[in-house]
Image (cartoon, rainbow, N blue to C red):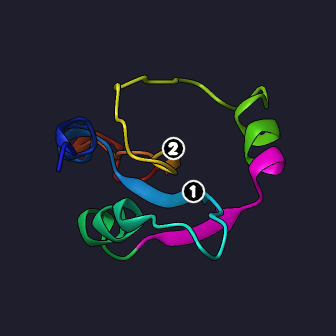
């Protein structure tokens, strides 16, 4: 499995949630299971295809990374949290 980009992101960013594109009942999206395993205890949502596309067009979308992943339904939207620095303990 080619999950190196997500693994790299997880090394530097606190991920709070993930949204994937909902797959048709007959389709295989084993990559979602791989994402769940890597992401651990985060909020998880599957979103209808066109709603997913609308979501990525929102002004709050900050960064889009294209990896060349070939598996279907591999798109994922990550919600990234804030990292507190030691000197910001009252933040």
Seen in the picture, residue 20 relative to 58 is either above or below; the reply is below
Q: Name the mark on residue 38.
A: none
Q: To which quarter of the image does residue 25 belong?
A: bottom right
Tell me which residue sits at (62%, 68%) in the image: 45
Give coordinates of residue 65: x percent, y percent. Answer: 43, 24
Give the residues in magenta: 42-51
> Pointer 2 and pointer 1: residues touching (CB < 8 Å)?
yes
Q: Nearer the viewer, residue 26 or 20?
A: 26
Residue 74 in picture, x, y percent from top left: 45, 47
Badge 2: how crowded within 10 Å, few (<14), some, or many (20+)? some
Dot 1 alpha-carbon crowd within 10 angstroms: few under 14, some 14 to 19, many 20 or more: many
What is the secondary structure assignment of the residue under circle 2?
Answer: loop
On the image, numbered disc 2 is attached to which residue?
Answer: 75
Would you place residue 51 above or below residue 19 in this image?
above
Does residue 25 appear left or right of residue 13 in this picture?
right
> Could you give the CA–CA distance between mark 2 and mark 1, rounded to whole angstroms?
6 Å
**Residue lying at the far front of the rendered structure:** 26
Q: Quadrant of residue 70?
A: top left
**Image point 44% across, 45% down: which residue?**
82
Q: Position of residue 67 (x, y in %)?
A: 34, 26
Res. 20 mark: 1
Q: Secondary structure at mark 1?
A: strand
Instruction: State the residue at coordinates (51%, 58%).
Output: 18
Is residue 83 found inside the magenta-colored segment of the image? Answer: no
Q: Judge whether 81 appears above or below 62 on screen.
A: below
Task: Report if residue 45 lies within the magenta region.
Answer: yes
Q: Is residue 13 left or right of residue 52?
A: left
């Amino acid at each position: 499995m080619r999950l190196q980009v997500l693994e790299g992101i997880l090394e530097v960013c606190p991920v709070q949630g993930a949204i994937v594109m909902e797959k048709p009942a007959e389709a295989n999206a084993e990559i979602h299971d791989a994402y769940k395993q890597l992401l651990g205890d985060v909020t998880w949502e599957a979103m209808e295809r066109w709603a997913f596309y609308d979501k990525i067009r929102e002004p709050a979308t900050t960064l889009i990374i294209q990896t060349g992943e070939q598996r279907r339904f591999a798109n994922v939207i990550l919600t990234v949290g804030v990292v507190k620095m030691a000197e910001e303990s009252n933040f």
